[in-house]
Image (tube, grey):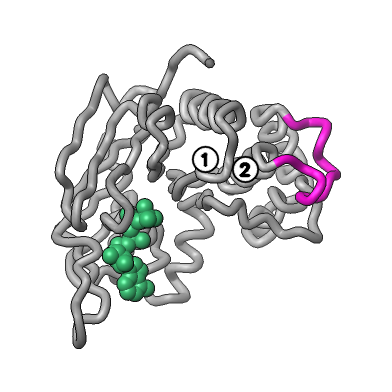
Amino acid sequence: MNNTVIDVHNISRVYNPDTIPVYAVNNVHLHLQRGEFTALVGPSGSGKTTLLNMIGGLDKPDAGTIIINGMNITELSPRELVDFRLHNIGFVFQSYNLIPVLTAKENVEFIMLLQGKSKQERDQRVQQLFKEIGMEDKLNVRPAQLSSGQQQRVAVARALASKPQFILADEPTANLDSKSAANLLDIMALLNADENITFLFSTHDQRVINRARRVITLVDGKIASDTAAVDISQPHKFETV
Ligand SMILES: Nc1ncnc2c1ncn2[C@@H]1O[C@H](COP(=O)(O)OP(=O)(O)OP(=O)(O)O)[C@@H](O)[C@H]1O
């Protein structure tokens, strides 16, 4: 069985090509296998967000191809991409991006509604996810009544609601205190182990980097190093902190 989930072939993204070109991502080649728990690191401006956005189908490369689970997403129309993202990719952003007028449960349920899932399926998945993020008592609370760490946990549950192939997380702990950041990493690792979800997350936080099984370093839009500590194809298991 082919376990490659993300297959990136020589992609580049150049901003301002006609004035002062910025090679945000420069000829990057990358494979991620199912079950990986991988950190994308590098100095500010090294191209982490640009790369994540292209892998997530939010932006298109100027050159190269991105194959997700056997599908060449660089050939999809904008409409096909929306549908592909909905069924295959979960996103977690630095700023949570929860919908303020919806409850925590409704925020998580929303994407399943778009997917046309039945009420029974939605309820089951919501119960399971809120148990996994340790927030079964916060189902009907709005984001404003939750701490930053709790909001980000809901954002992770929302990203997982549709049972995506993988989760892309852009600086998921950037706005969290160290206890909440550690807690979020515990939850992401638990979900990685329990559901074999592949995680690729960008970070500047050394404590988060220490928890990754593989660390890919970008410098000036190129991969400067790619180190795997252990067998990256196995679900992540480590002591909680
Ligand atoms: N929309 C844009 N237009 C022009 N240049 C851009 C645009 N977005 C990003 N860039 C440039 O592309 C390069 C890579 O930016 P990117 O945001 O991907 O880096 P990053 O590693 O995620 O940075 P940070 O860690 O600060 O979030 C930078 O030089 C940035 O200034």
Could you say which disc has been placed on residue 173 in the image? 1
Question: Is residue 44 placed above or below 175 in the rendered structure?
Answer: below
The first of marks 2 and 1 along the sequence is 2
Magenta run includes residue 44: no
Magenta run includes residue 141: yes
Asked if residue 20 lies left or right of residue 110, the reply is left
State the image coordinates of residue 164 (x, y, percent, origin top left).
Answer: 50, 46
Specify the amino acid type for callout 1: Thr
Q: Which span is picked out in magenta? A: 135-147
Q: Is residue 130 visible?
A: yes
Badge 1 marks a residue whose secondary structure is loop
Asked if residue 52 lies left or right of residue 122, the reply is left
The residue carrying mark 2 has its beta carbon less than 8 Å from ligand 1: no
State the image coordinates of residue 26 (x, y, percent, origin top left).
Answer: 16, 61
Q: What's the distance in space between the residues labelled 2 and 1, CA to CA?
A: 8 Å
- Ligand 1 lies in quarter: bottom left
Q: Nearer the viewer, residue 189 or 18?
A: 18
User: How many other residues sit within 10 Å of disc 1, few (<14), some (14-19) or many (≥20)?
Assistant: many
Asked if residue 84 lies left or right of residue 74, the reply is right
Q: Quadrant of residue 73?
A: bottom left
Which residue shows up at 50% across the image and 65% down it?
Answer: 83
User: How many other residues sit within 10 Å of disc 2, few (<14), some (14-19) or many (≥20)?
Assistant: many
State the image coordinates of residue 38 (x, y, percent, origin top left).
Answer: 34, 35
Could you say which disc has been placed on residue 152 in the image? 2
Which residue shows up at 79% across the image and 57% down it?
Answer: 102
Could you say which disc has been placed on residue 139 in the image? none
Specify the amino acid type for callout 2: Gln
Q: Are marks 2 and 1 in contact (CB under 8 Å)?
A: yes
